[in-house]
Amino acid sequence: MTTASSADGGHASEVQFTIKPRDLHKQVARCWGRAQESVPEWPQIPLTVPDFRPKAISMPWDAFQRSLVEDVERYLALLSGDSILDEDAPDRACKPSTIATRRNYLRLAASAAVERGVPAEALRSLADLVSPSTVRLILEHYLAKKDGKIVSFTIDMAERLCAIARVYVKAPETRIQVLERYCAKLRRKRHVGLTEKNMAVVRAFKNPDNRNRLKALPGRLFDEALAERDAPIQAAVKAQIALAIQILLIAPMRLANLAALNLEQNVVRVRGSEE
């Protein structure tokens, strides 16, 4: 990896060039856009930042049999705790966000099955979707998408379909054993530890200069926000970003939890001794 400096509004900024052509393509398009905004003489020819992500093959629910969709909703209602006395209901009801994620997983699974040759009309219920032959096609689809690399999504898909077969469908034990073998084979190949991409970030912060720059970033952004006179909305956004970074430095949390923080409910105001 090499680095180079570029002009950006009179300030030098470091640009990293990697050996990955697609990453370089996107980086060049972004730099071109920044140059158009900051350099008056720069050619005003637009460059679009490319999106190399594979096109989704997921199908809408109305492309499937109504009986399958209704069965999916019955299963999700069970998870949501609608019938607390049902023997198959979970001890703790799933949150709405979890229900939405499970619904999406099942739609992706059904879409993958169709992509692999299963007729949509053959998927009449969850029992059809979690049959060993169909689950194998679904898993093969996602393995092929990653060129055989086993990622957490594929393992989660296998385990969730197996759980549906065991708890909700109550499939025969012979079928459950087949699905459990799929799960076990995938689990053995699970990547342990951080990914290489995350490790590269960790290695960057072994440099004390990088750590110091990160610690100083919230204060610098907040000072810039206070100095902004002509663009109050942009200044407010910058101040918000500064506060978010400072909170994460002191109390790391998921971004969804950070976004859900409420000043009155989640922030405890500590007062000193009153005289």
Image (spheres, rainbow, N blue to C red):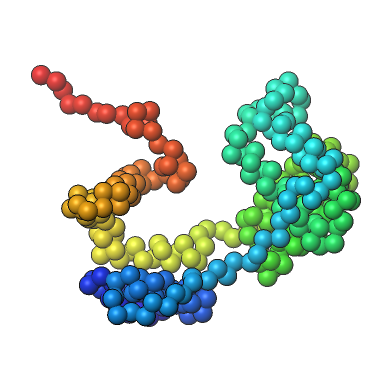
Left or right: residue 182 versus residue 247 is right
Observer-nearest residue: 57 or 142? 57
The residue lying furthest to the left in this view is: 275
Left or right: residue 158 versus residue 21 is right
Which residue is painted at 63% across and 44% down in the image? 101
Where is residue 85 drawn, in percent x and y?
A: 73, 20
Which residue is painted at 29% across and 71% down in the image? 38
Where is residue 215 drawn, in percent x and y?
A: 26, 54
Q: Quadrant of residue 136?
A: bottom right
Q: Is residue 96 visible?
A: yes
Observer-nearest residue: 99 or 37? 37
Which quadrant, please, contains the N terminus? bottom left
Left or right: residue 15 versus residue 272 is right
Q: Is residue 208 visible?
A: no
Relative vertical location of residue 130 with respect to residue 140 in this rendering, above or below = above
Which residue is painted at 69% across and 66% down in the image? 145
Left or right: residue 46 versus residue 244 is right
